[in-house]
Image: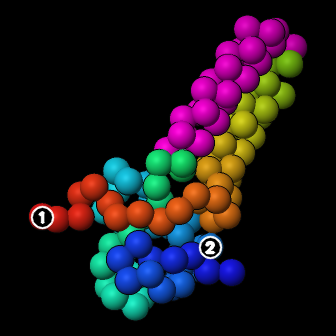
Amino acid sequence: MKYTCPHCNEKTFTPLQKALAGSMKSVGKPCPNCGRKCCNGMAAIYFDCIITIIMFIAIMIIYFKADSSVKMQSVLLMAIIIIARFILSFLFRMFFGKLVQPIRVMK
Ligand SMILES: [Zn+2]
């Protein structure tokens, strides 16, 4: 399974390369075929936004519900949530959304 480059329309990006290509705010990754830069489209930004909100809500709930007796567990749980947010974001970029041309494509 490969993703299509928005410049040359060849299937050149593997899911891992796509995940590492960054969002539209980044400079993107060059296509192995045509050398022009590609990045993840708006879907990745929306998804990041949604899971970041969920992450903050979850952390807030843990923060206000936890008393001192479970402090270590709640800190650990918050760390897991933050790590999970990055993993989910990465997996989303690997398997969902399209490659597009970055906004900052020209110098
Ligand atoms: Zn290309």
- Residue found 32% across the figure and 60% down from its top: 102
- Which circle marks residue 54 in the picture? none
Query: Is residue 3 placed above or below 40 in the rendered structure?
Result: below
Residue 59 shown in magenta: yes
Query: Is residue 30 placed above or below 102 in the rendered structure?
Result: below
- Residue found 67% across the figure and 64% down from its top: 95
Residue corresponding to mark 1 = 107
**How packed is label 1: few (under 14 Cα within 10 Å), some, or many (20 or more)?**
few
Secondary structure at numbered mark 2: helix
| Quarter of the rendering containing residue 71 | top right
Query: Is residue 10 placed above or below 102 in the rendered structure?
Result: below
Residue 62, x across and y down, in percent: 76, 18
In the rendered structure, the answer to whether residue 15 lies left or right of residue 8 reads right
Distance from label 1 to label 2 (Cα)? 27 Å
Secondary structure at numbered mark 1: loop
Residue 5, x across and y down, in percent: 45, 77
Which residues, given as a range, are shown in magenta?
45-69
